[in-house]
Image (tube, rainbow, N blue to C red):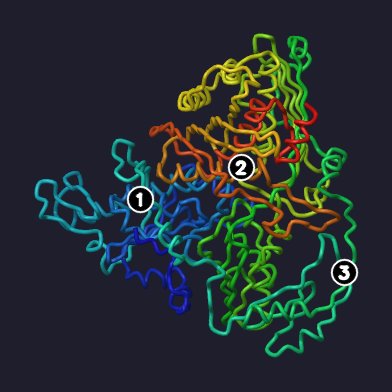
Amino acid sequence: MKSENFLDLDFKDVKSSFELDRREFVKLLGGGLLLLFTVGDSFAYMQEQQRRRGGELPTDFNAFLHIGENGRVTCFTGKIEMGQGVITSLAQELADELDVSLDSVDMVMGDTDLCPWDMGTFGSMTTRFFGPPLRAAGAEAKKILLEMASEKLKKPVNQLIVKDGIVSDRLNKKNNVSYAQLAKGKKIEKHLKGKVEVKTPKEFKIINRPFTRHDSKLKVTGKAKYSADILLPEMLYAKILRPPAHGAKLINADLSEAKKIEGVVVVEEKDLIAVLHKYPDVAQRALEKIKANFSKSESTLDDKNIFDHLLKFPHEERKVAEKGSLKTGEENSPVITQGVYYDGYKAHSPIEPHAAVAKIEGKKITVWGSTQNPFTAKEEVANALGIPSDNVRLTPPFLGGGFGGKTMNRQIVEAARLTKITGKPVMVNYTREEEFFYDAFRPAAVVKIKSGCTKEGKINLWDYQVYFAGERGADPFYDLPNSLVRAYNSARGEQNVHPFATGPWRAPGNNTNTFARESQMDIMAAKIGMDPVEFRLKNLKDKKMIDVLNAAAKKFGWKNIKPPSGKGYGVALGIDAGTYVAMIAKVNVNKDSGNVKVERVVCAQDMGLVINPEGAAIQMEGCIMMGLGYTLSEDLKFKNGEILDKNFDTYEIPRFEWLPKIEMEILHKEDEPPQGGGEPAIVTVGAAIANAIFDAAGIRLNQMPMNPDRIKAALAKK
């Protein structure tokens, strides 16, 4: 697949590569067939999302594809590629419905001038919500082309077949015409009335087949372009004065020494003080010359007292789920268990820090930025500059990881402001310290659970309260006849409770909720001396979850145990983005050092129809590896508004040497709708390892990360 997506182009000739509107782009592709389409429930869903954001949904929204005279197919999507592999899987869906080769599909992603509006790339929603209308578009385009071919070949449509973009008479294969020949010299805009049928699983040739990701070679060879790789003529690198702590206010700044450095441009505008130079190291030297005084932050919070603060802070209650009576449940539960679980702030830590390059020409400003939501970023730039949004273009190159952290677009707005002020192209590229300081961290949270069961293992009581993690993953999937689930959020707005910005972090909230729920499940099982897999099966009626648990247990070779057995086995279940997950981990606990070595992880997953099994497996592996970080080491340190972790020397993310043996079992359900794949497997990692640590060493940890200090402290109390 030659899917340029404008991501592997040479940026030397930026004007010819980027500065095109939709009409000009179509001309560049050489006319051809232009298809606009509007179909299905996914369209209605996205319409609602657009309404909530106050935008106007164009009538031709949902997808936009072009078939050129050269026979190549261009797919336009508002989604972006940040490592999840949709640059390949979306192309698979379109290629299969059109009956063209995968290699003939080019992807254009996230360009706000060329692509249909999109809410952003997050929540594992690309395949679930954009995939169905994209497939419908391919089916619709194919129907149009068959009608055109019927006229050309003088044969009825039902006598024609298509293979690799060639339409042939099934009775005379030499009588054929290509999509390229049908589109040549023509520009056809057409809506088809009525429902267009997409292929059934039996008809798939490309969907549900494993394909190596198109961007893999570009990335491993260093040819892939990221925002910080863009070099424009006369471009200036910006370094911006930052406060030492969140809540600190600038009192005054002496810029005189910075102004003395030759070639440095100094900018002062409202809250923005920046120095710019054609060389980044000179700009950095100028920044260091600024003498600035800031007020102290008023925050008294740190990573030690944050949990007490959360529980005392004024909050609002929302009932997530309610069934039966807690009083009845407690009366029928001879075994009562209470637990409190804690989870600190986590950084997103993408390999690529936030970066943006902005260029202004006339009334038009173009920004190349690392963002998961280019259309939102476009509006942010327009608002900051006080210009019409039509005068702003966002075009994201590849992103070097996002995980929810690149929905904040500060660097894009800063680059746009500076290019407007200076009239020059400007790059804002965060240092790792800036990346940590301005991250929208996964929020710290507390979960309280009171549960009860019979001595035979039937759960009758489930009283669940989650503070500030959110409710994703809190709604129970177990059979709980007497249950109440409550979520507590700030009554004053979320950013008032936290000392800095917080936001979505790969499967937001579900990691915390699954850690608490599945730890509590194991505690109950251990109390009554029951095998943790048997205990879960006894309290499950959901067939999907039963199936994934049995699949994981079978692949692992699970034998009945009564924790703590000393074997180091732990199990956890979860649901995220419509996907069911069962995970079993084997760990070794070094009782002298407190180190935990995860030796083996088995993960079974039911995600409905799998578009690209190879891509799905890669995402599962990535989730498991990333999950080791929040489980075992990642714990943001801060005090009085200051972020104490400034790089990876103190904030420890997973290392290659941590990699366990990973075995996966995907339950293929070709007749069911596809579900999310980029996040589900991460939600069960913390709980599976916590339960495995208990089985190995007999210690129960109720706070993540379960680092060596906490392991040793728990062992000392044993």
Closer mark to the observer between disc 3 and disc 1: 3
For the residues labelled 1 and 2, the Cα–Cα distance comes to 40 Å
Any part of residue 645 in sight: yes
User: Relative to residue 290, is residue 407 drawn left or right?
Assistant: left
Residue type pointed to by label 2: Leu
Q: Is residue 482 above or below residue 218?
A: above
Q: Is residue 689 above or below residue 533?
A: below
Which mark is drawn over residue 628? 2
Q: Is residue 670 above or below residue 501?
A: above
Q: Nearer the viewer, residue 344 or 656?
A: 656
Q: Residue at x 69, y 19 (%)?
A: 524
* Residue 397 image point, x, y percent: 51, 65
- Give the mark count: 3
* Residue 710 image point, x, y percent: 75, 38
Any part of residue 510 in sight: no
The residue pinned by badge 1 equals 138
Residue type pointed to by label 3: Phe
Q: Quadrant of the C terminus?
A: top right
Q: Secondary structure at mark 2?
A: helix
Which mark is drawn over residue 294? 3
* Residue 126 image point, x, y percent: 50, 48
For the residues labelled 3 and 1, the Cα–Cα distance comes to 57 Å
- The disc, 2 or 3, on the residue closer to the chain's N-terminal end is 3
Q: Nearer the viewer, residue 34 or 269?
A: 269
- The disc, 3 or 1, on the residue closer to the chain's N-terminal end is 1
Which mark is drawn over residue 467? none
Q: Nearer the viewer, residue 678 or 597?
A: 597
